[in-house]
C-alpha cells in the first residue's frame, strides 16, 4: 500500500513540476541586464531598458525605448505629419519632417515623434492605409487596415474606417465648412442638376453646359496606382470647361455655382463614415493587444514569419486613455547582440507596459524615435538599424501649442453676429504681440506678411519669425459664438537677427521656464 501511495505521489509531483516549467516557459519574462535609463526631455519622458527576454523556450536580448507625454496637458497634442508634394507622394526622414513642420508652424514646438505607416518604399512613397492629416483625408483606400485614430478632442482609438464613397467639401477663407455632401457621380456627369458630380481630366465624354460645371484649378490631385484618392483646389476665375487638364477638375450639381467663390477651397476626398471629427490617422499592421490581452492577430502567426525578429515601432493606449510609443532596436547581432522582436513578443511587451490596446506600426529600418532637448535640438533615441535615418512616408509628432482647429460646420440657420475687432495692437520690448481680448473669442488669427498663425491667447511671441519686415494684423477667428471679425489696423514690425548674447540669454530663460 505504501509503495502505491509513493508511486502516486511521485507521478503527481512529476506532473506538477512539468506543468510548472512549461507554464514558466510560455510566460513572457524580462530580466534587466543593466539599470534603466530615465530621461526628461522638453515635454516628454523616456525610459530605455536593456533586458533579457524569455518566451516559449526562446531567450534573446532586447533594447527598447518608451516615449510618453502628459496626456492631461491641454497644450500638448498628437498630429500626423508627412512631406507629400502636390500631385505626388514622397518620402523624407522623420527629422526632415519635423523641420518641415516647424517651418510651416514656427509658433508650435515639436516635442518628439515616431515613424508611421507602411508604404510604397520602392516607388511613390504612398502610405498603405487610410491617412488623415489636419482633418483632410489624404488617402482613403484600403479600409481593411488597422488605424491609430487621433480625434479632435485629443482622445485616441485603434480601429478601422468604413468607406462611404466620395464627398465634396467647400471651405471659405476662414476655414469654415460652407458645404459638405456625398458625391453621386464620380468621373461621370451628373444625371441632373440635383446630383453632385466630379469629373477628372481622364473623362472622355461630353458634359452639358446646362449642368453649370465649375472648373477647379487644383493645388493637389493624388492617386495610388489608378485609384483616385483626393483633389483640392479653388475656383478658376478665367478658365472654363474646355481647359480641363490633369491639374484641374470639374464639380457640378445642385446650387454649387451660387455657393463656391474664388476665395473658397474645394476638397474632394474619400468619405469615411463618422470620421468628421478625426484630426489624423496612422495605419498599422496587426493588432498587438486587444482588451488587455495579446491579440490573436499575432498569436496565430505561424511558420517563418512567427520567428522573424526585427526592429519594431508600436503604439499603445492604456486603460486611462493615455498613449505611449515603443521602439525596439533590432538587427544588431554583431553589435549589442540585439536581434529585435517577433510580432507576438511585441504584443507581450506592449501588454507588460500597460497597453489595453496596441498596434504595430512600420518597423525594420523605418523604426525611428526622436525627442526634443531643452535647447531645441533633437535626439534620436533608438539605434537605427540602417546605420542612418531612413526616408519614410509619414509619422506621428508630439507638439505643444495652438494647433489648427477642426473646420467649423454650421448646420441650419446661421444666427451668429460678427465679433468685435481686436484693438490696442502693439509689440512689447520682448517681441510679444499684444492686443485686446474680445468677449466670446476662443482663437485669434495673426497675419504676419504671408504667414498666418492661430493663438488662443492675446499675447503671441514673434521670435519665431525670420528676419525681415512684416505688416501684422489680428482678427478673431469664428466659433459657435460669432463670425470672424474684421482685421485690426496693421502695425509694422522688423524682425532682426539675434546677437549671440541675446540668443544665449533667451535660451537660458527658455530652459528655466520649462523646468
Image (tube, rainbow, N blue to C red):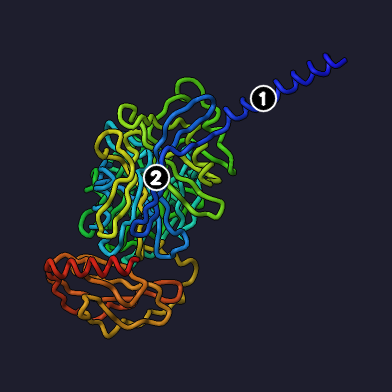
Nearer the observer: mark 2 or 1; the answer is 1
The residue that label 2 is drawn on is: 48
Density class for disc 2 (Cα within 10 Å; few <14, some 14-19, many ≥20) is many
Residue 178: percent from left, percent from top: 40, 63
Question: Which quadrant does the C terminus fall into?
Answer: bottom left
**Residue 461 pos. (x, y %):** 26, 72
The residue to which callout 1 is attached is 17
Query: Who's the residue at 46% across and 44% down the image?
Result: 147
Which residue is painted at 54% across and 26% down in the image? 56
Q: Is residue 423 left or right of residue 63?
A: left
Q: Is residue 233 visible?
A: yes
Residue lying at the far bottom of the rendered structure? 424
Q: Residue furthest right?
A: 1
Q: Are marks 2 and 1 in contact (CB under 8 Å)?
A: no
Q: Residue at x 50, y 41 (%)?
A: 350
Residue drawn at (50%, 32%), measured in percent from left and top? 344
The x and y percentages for residue 358 are: 50, 43
Tell me the quarter of the picture where residue 6 sits: top right
Secondary element at image label 2? strand
Residue 445 appears left or right of 500: right
Amino acid at each position: 500500500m505504501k509503495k502505491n501511495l509513493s508511486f502516486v505521489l511521485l507521478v503527481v509531483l512529476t506532473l506538477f513540476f512539468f506543468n510548472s516549467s512549461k507554464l514558466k516557459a510560455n510566460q513572457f519574462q524580462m530580466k534587466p541586464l543593466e539599470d534603466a535609463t530615465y530621461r526628461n526631455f522638453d515635454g516628454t519622458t523616456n525610459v530605455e531598458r536593456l533586458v533579457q527576454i524569455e518566451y516559449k523556450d526562446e531567450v534573446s536580448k532586447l533594447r527598447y525605448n518608451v516615449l510618453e507625454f502628459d496626456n492631461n496637458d491641454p497644450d500638448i497634442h498628437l498630429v500626423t505629419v508627412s512631406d507629400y508634394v502636390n500631385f505626388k507622394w514622397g518620402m523624407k526622414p522623420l527629422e526632415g519632417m519635423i523641420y518641415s513642420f516647424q517651418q510651416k508652424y514656427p509658433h508650435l514646438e515639436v516635442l518628439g515623434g515616431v515613424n508611421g505607416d507602411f508604404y510604397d518604399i520602392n516607388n511613390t512613397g504612398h502610405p498603405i492605409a487610410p491617412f488623415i492629416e489636419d482633418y483632410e483625408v489624404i488617402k482613403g483606400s484600403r479600409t481593411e487596415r488597422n488605424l491609430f485614430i487621433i480625434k479632435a478632442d485629443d482622445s485616441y482609438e485603434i480601429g478601422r474606417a468604413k468607406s462611404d464613397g466620395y464627398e465634396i467639401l467647400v471651405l471659405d477663407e476662414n476655414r469654415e465648412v460652407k458645404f459638405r455632401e456625398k458625391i453621386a457621380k464620380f468621373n461621370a456627369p451628373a444625371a441632373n442638376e440635383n446630383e453632385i458630380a466630379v469629373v477628372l481630366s481622364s473623362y472622355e465624354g461630353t458634359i452639358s453646359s446646362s449642368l453649370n460645371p465649375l472648373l477647379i484649378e487644383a493645388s493637389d490631385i493624388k492617386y495610388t496606382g489608378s485609384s483616385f484618392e483626393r483633389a483640392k483646389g479653388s475656383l478658376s476665375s478665367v478658365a472654363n470647361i474646355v481647359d480641363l487638364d490633369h491639374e484641374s477638375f470639374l464639380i457640378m450639381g445642385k446650387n454649387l455655382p451660387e455657393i463656391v467663390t474664388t476665395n473658397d477651397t474645394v476638397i474632394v476626398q474619400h468619405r469615411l463614415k463618422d470620421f468628421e471629427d478625426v484630426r489624423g490617422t496612422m495605419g498599422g499592421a496587426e493588432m498587438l493587444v486587444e482588451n488587455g490581452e495579446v491579440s490573436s492577430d499575432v498569436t496565430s502567426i505561424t511558420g517563418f514569419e512567427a520567428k522573424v525578429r526585427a526592429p519594431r515601432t508600436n503604439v499603445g493606449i492604456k486603460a486611462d486613455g493615455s498613449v505611449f510609443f515603443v521602439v525596439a532596436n533590432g538587427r544588431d547581432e554583431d553589435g549589442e547582440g540585439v536581434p529585435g522582436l517577433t510580432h507576438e513578443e511585441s504584443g507581450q511587451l506592449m501588454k507588460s507596459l500597460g497597453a489595453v490596446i496596441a498596434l504595430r506600426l512600420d518597423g525594420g529600418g523605418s523604426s525611428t524615435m526622436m525627442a526634443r532637448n531643452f535647447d531645441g535640438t533633437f535626439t534620436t533615441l533608438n539605434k537605427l538599424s540602417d546605420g542612418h535615418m531612413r526616408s519614410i512616408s509619414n509619422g506621428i509628432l508630439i507638439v505643444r501649442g495652438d494647433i489648427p482647429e477642426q473646420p467649423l460646420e454650421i448646420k441650419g440657420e446661421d444666427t451668429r453676429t460678427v465679433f468685435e475687432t481686436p484693438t490696442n495692437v502693439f509689440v512689447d520690448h520682448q517681441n510679444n504681440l499684444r492686443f485686446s481680448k474680445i468677449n466670446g473669442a476662443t482663437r485669434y488669427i495673426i497675419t504676419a506678411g504671408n504667414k498666418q498663425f492661430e493663438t488662443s491667447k492675446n499675447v503671441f511671441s514673434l521670435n519665431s519669425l525670420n528676419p525681415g519686415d512684416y505688416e501684422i494684423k489680428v482678427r478673431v477667428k469664428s466659433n459657435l459664438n460669432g463670425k470672424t471679425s474684421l482685421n485690426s489696423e496693421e502695425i509694422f514690425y522688423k524682425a532682426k537677427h539675434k546677437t549671440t548674447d541675446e540668443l544665449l540669454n533667451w535660451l537660458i530663460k527658455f530652459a528655466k521656464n520649462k523646468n
